[in-house]
């Protein structure tokens, strides 16, 4: 799951561009007893064709005795993302099929996309439930080359159809110089903009879920997120999948002055949208070492709580990551080492911007910084990848919460950041260097043309400034 803590309870509304934005509220991996977190998605016939894409997927309960599953419920909603590549030109377009409740009709009929018959189509799914199970319709799972997991062990919230063929076509187009993914660029901190394979932003189950949005009416019916439907359905709310990809594209990138890679939306002419496959292609091309790849301890690739090579490779194939011959090649301990070496430092470096950024879930954290801090702490801890035990090193990030359990500050390697000063209960000390504010007096700044590093030593009550010696 995306969030440090994972589950999905009440709803949060944030007003963005005039549309109410519905996000799942993330709490713990244990579901609230009243909410059925195991849902089934009925895949329409011929899902990789234009008509199949425009036929709504249907959501229902895997076990009705556990309660219903409804697309309007942000704790259960499931989302589908599609991508289409023309192998002759390398052009990629996005089309996000609609999900409706079984037996209902969409609030507005989906747009039938237009693309050449030679194009290669793939689908990815993300759910706010815990486990999404795919159900066949007239051979749809085979026709779509759909993968839900292995040997009766589902990945969880995610799945894909025909993704390996799509990525193969994309990589061939890149090699032929037909497709040129844009560089992620440089962030406000003068570091490369992060990708979904950057250890500064990954969690215990990276590369999961999608960036699809839907409109939900007051009667619980859904429609594709298009300009036409927004105008036709006043008062409809915007529902989204809480995902690693959305966190990067809609929250981290804007905070750090970066821009996600976008492609045309076939359902909404003139609209450019981000997508999970775009993120993975860009990361594969530009992410510098060390590269974060799904480790063997990722909860989504375990079988009965144990690492499983077949499931690990099945998951990696769906996000265009290299397959491995052994579990040791996807060492969770190595993953943790890189998470420890890279994550806290950039979390602290970027805090001057992320403290001003919106939290993905205001019920969990009061800013983007505190959301990322608690997400890191969970991933590093025993309920995530258990890095502390694997490395024998304590969590460098400690989160402070208020009386409502909302993260309001964090301490990173002993330095307090955010309101409340982490674990100390006092406000953090900031340094202003020629007008540039260094939160927690940590980071780098330019003095007389030289890049100097600042470190706050709380025990000595000193700010240590190190500048290179001129020749």
Image (cartoon, helix red, strand yellow):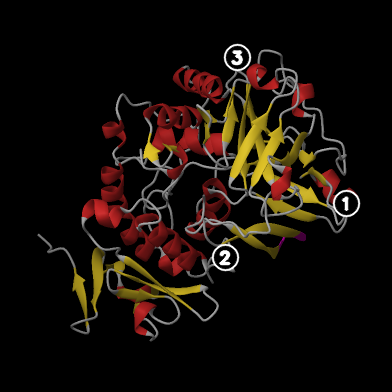
> What's the residue at 42%, 33% (across, down)?
284
> Could you say where residue 215 lies in the image, as x and y percent from the top left?
78, 49
- Marks 3 and 2 sit apart, C-alpha to C-alpha, by 41 Å
Q: Is residue 91 above or below residue 342?
A: above
Image-quadrant location for residue 332: top left
The reply to whether the C-beta atoms of the residues labelled 3 and 2 are less than 8 Å apart is no
Please give left or right for residue 466 compared with residue 42 in the image: left
Q: Is residue 108 above or below residue 246?
A: above
> What's the residue at 35%, 76% (across, down)?
416
Q: Which mark is residue 88?
A: 3
| Nearest the eye: 90 or 320 | 320
Question: Crowdedness of circle 2 by 10 Å Cα count: few (<14), some, many (20+)?
Answer: many
The reply to whether the C-beta atoms of the residues labelled 3 and 1 are less than 8 Å apart is no
Magenta run includes residue 18: yes
Magenta run includes residue 459: no
Q: Which mark is residue 358?
A: 2
Classified by dominant secondary structure, the portion drawn in magenta counts as strand
For label 1, the residue is 233
**Can you see residue 221?**
yes
> Could you say where residue 76 lies in the image, as x and y percent from the top left?
68, 50
Question: Crowdedness of circle 1 by 10 Å Cα count: few (<14), some, many (20+)?
Answer: some
């Amino acid at each position: 799951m995306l969030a440090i803590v994972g589950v999905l309870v009440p709803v949060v509304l944030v007003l963005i561009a005039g549309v109410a934005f519905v996000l799942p509220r993330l709490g713990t991996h244990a579901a609230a007893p009243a909410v059925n977190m195991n849902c089934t998605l009925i895949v329409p016939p011929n899902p990789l064709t234009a008509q199949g894409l425009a036929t709504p997927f249907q959501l229902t309960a895997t076990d009705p005795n556990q309660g219903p599953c409804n697309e309007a419920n942000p704790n259960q909603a499931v989302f589908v993302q599609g991508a289409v590549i023309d192998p002759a030109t390398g052009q990629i377009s996005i089309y996000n099929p609609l999900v409706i409740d079984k037996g209902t009709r969409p609030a507005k009929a989906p747009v039938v996309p237009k693309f050449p018959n030679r194009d290669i189509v793939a689908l990815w799914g993300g759910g706010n439930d815990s486990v999404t199970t795919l159900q066949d319709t007239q051979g749809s799972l085979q026709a779509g080359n759909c993968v839900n997991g292995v040997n009766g062990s589902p990945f969880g919230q995610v799945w894909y159809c025909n993704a390996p063929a799509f990525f193969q076509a994309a990589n061939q187009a890149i090699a032929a110089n037909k497709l040129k993914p844009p560089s992620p660029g440089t962030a406000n901190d003068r570091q490369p903009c992060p990708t979904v394979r950057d250890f500064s932003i990954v969690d215990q189950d990276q590369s999961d879920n999608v960036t699809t949005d839907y409109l939900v009416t007051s009667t619980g019916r859904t429609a594709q997120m298009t300009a036409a439907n927004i105008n036709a359905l006043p008062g409809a709310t915007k529902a989204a999948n809480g995902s690693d990809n959305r966190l990067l594209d809609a929250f981290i990138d804007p905070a750090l002055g970066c821009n996600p890679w976008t492609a045309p939306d076939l359902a909404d002419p003139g609209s450019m949208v981000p997508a999970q496959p775009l993120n993975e292609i860009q990361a594969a091309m530009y992410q510098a070492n060390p590269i974060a790849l799904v480790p063997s301890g990722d909860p989504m690739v375990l079988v009965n709580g144990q690492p499983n090579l077949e499931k690990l490779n099945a998951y990696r194939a769906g996000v265009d990551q290299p397959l491995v011959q052994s579990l040791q090649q996807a060492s969770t301990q190595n993953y943790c080492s890189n998470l420890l070496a890279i994550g806290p430092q950039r979390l602290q470096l970027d805090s001057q911007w992320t403290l001003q950024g919106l939290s993905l879930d205001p019920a969990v954290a009061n800013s983007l910084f505190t959301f990322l801090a608690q997400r890191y702490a969970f991933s590093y801890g025993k309920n995530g990848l258990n890095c502390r035990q694997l490395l024998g090193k304590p969590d460098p990030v400690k989160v402070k919460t208020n009386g409502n359990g909302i993260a309001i500050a964090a301490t990173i390697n002993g330095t307090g950041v955010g309101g409340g000063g982490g674990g100390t209960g006092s406000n953090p000390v900031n340094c202003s260097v020629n007008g540039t504010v260094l939160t927690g007096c940590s980071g780098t700044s330019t003095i007389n043309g030289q890049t100097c590093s600042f470190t706050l030593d709380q025990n000595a009550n000193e700010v240590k400034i190190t500048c290179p010696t001129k020749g």
